[in-house]
Image (spheres, rainbow, N blue to C red):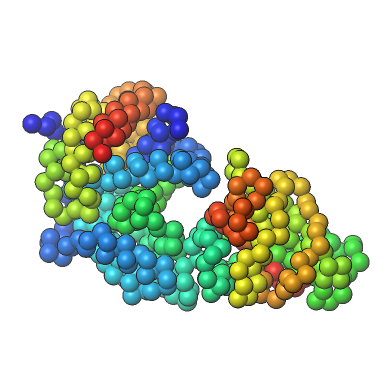
Amino acid sequence: MSDESHLLAGEYVLGTLTADERAEAARRLQDDPAFRAEVEDWQRRLLPLTASVAPVAPAPTVWRAVERAIAGRPAPANDNLGLLAMSRARWRSAAVALGALAAALALFVADRDFLRPPAPAGASYVAAVNRGGDLPALIVRVDLATHSVSVRPVEAEAPAGKSLELWYVAAGQSPKSMGVIQQGRGIRMAAPADMPVKDTILAVSVEPPGGSPTGAPTGPVIYKGQLIAE
Amino acid sequence: MFAAAPACAYHSWPKLKPEDSLPPSPSDLADLIAASARGDRAAFQRLYEATAPKLLGVILRIVRSRAEAEDVLQDAYIRVWKSAGLFSPASGTAFGWIASIVRNRAIDLLRAQGTVRRVQAGEDEDVLARIADTRDDFAQAADREALRRCLDTVEPKVREMIVLAYCDGYSRDELAGRYASPANTIKTWLHRGLAALRTCLDEKT
């Protein structure tokens, strides 16, 4: 790692970067593990400066607001960065949060395709695979009539030297690969024969070039979304 | 002995008595984060109670308004809950992980507001002695001692800048005002100080 990266990490932790520089550093934290490690080192090095700070009791309203905000979530959604190996229950809770947005996007997709002949009712499913709150990274359409899957990247970007791999996670099952996503290129493939559509979640993980060597996700999950009927 | 420099000392809000805030051991906190990641809200509440008062003190140094500080605290703990599954003991202590989330929220807020506070030379305290002596402390004793020694090797003016930036959230522009120097010069000084600090700390750890 260069001196420049060390100093950027140091200034990030000090807090002296400008808003733009901070945003850039925050982006780098997500996909540059060496930079992340350097930031963690600076956090550890400088933490003792807080030693002399005297505690101040927060108003009871603060905890009550936190409690309200976390109520009703069976488990943390992990900021969309957890591993696919996490339990099915957690996947479901993350998917619920994306439900409203995905529904809105499905409408948008349906509208764009207004001029195409309509598929038989219930035969077509779509997922907007996204990072919570952002624009969708991929729109995945599963067409049961033609038994095909099409993947249209909108914004998916692989970190340098890595591949993005698409997975589906059916209820109660472990993730199954649907292939590596070519940057900026749509793909069309036959739907995996045993792929259920009800309650199925699609996710994208960061993998070594060419895809996961193990057949299971090895890197962080950066995007995910649930298949819903179009 | 060590030269004087400003400390992350806290001075204008009511203080808790020390017995109200005995820090739990680092492994207790790590266990509470792990339980929170499994959805255990009671564990998360204990984590909050053990760490939030100390961190509100940290935030109040940076944002200076009680209402903003409590908003930052609230947002940060919601984030801690959501990302509890991402905590890895290999990357640092549990308290350090939460403190980073909290400080980042506070500084993000300051930088988003974009205001440049006018800052004056203030009450200087002996930060090095305080780092060494304090017992009300979540930091590891060895890290504390190493930082104390290494800050002492940085030239006093630059050491003061580093402490003001970390503890009080001073931006380069604010430091430029305080030291009557261009922001680029401040950046150069900060880089020099950080590089010296890193070299020294890496030798000692």
Outermost residue toward the front? A214
User: Residue A149: percent from the left, percent from the top?
Assistant: 79, 62
Front position in the image: B58 or B133: B133
Q: Looking at the rendering, which quadrant does residue A12 occupy?
A: top left
Is A49 left or right of B98, judged from the image as shown?
Answer: left
Residue at the spot x=18%, y=48% of the render? Answer: B141
Residue at the spot x=21%, y=39% of the render? Answer: B146
Tally of numbered tags: 0
Quadrant of the image containing the C terminus of chain B: top left
Front position in the image: B197 or A169: A169
Front position in the image: B35 or B15: B35
Q: Looking at the rendering, which quadrant does residue A194 occupy?
A: bottom right
Quadrant of the image containing the N terminus of chain B: top left
Is A194 left or right of A35, judged from the image as shown?
Answer: right
Is B20 left or right of A96, judged from the image as shown?
Answer: left
Residue B75: in sight, yes or no? no
User: Residue B203: percent from the left, percent from the top?
Assistant: 26, 32
User: Residue A229: percent from the left, percent from the top?
Assistant: 75, 73
Residue at the spot x=40%, y=40% of the render? Answer: A38
User: Residue A93: percent from the left, percent from the top?
Assistant: 54, 72
Front position in the image: B84 or B120: B84
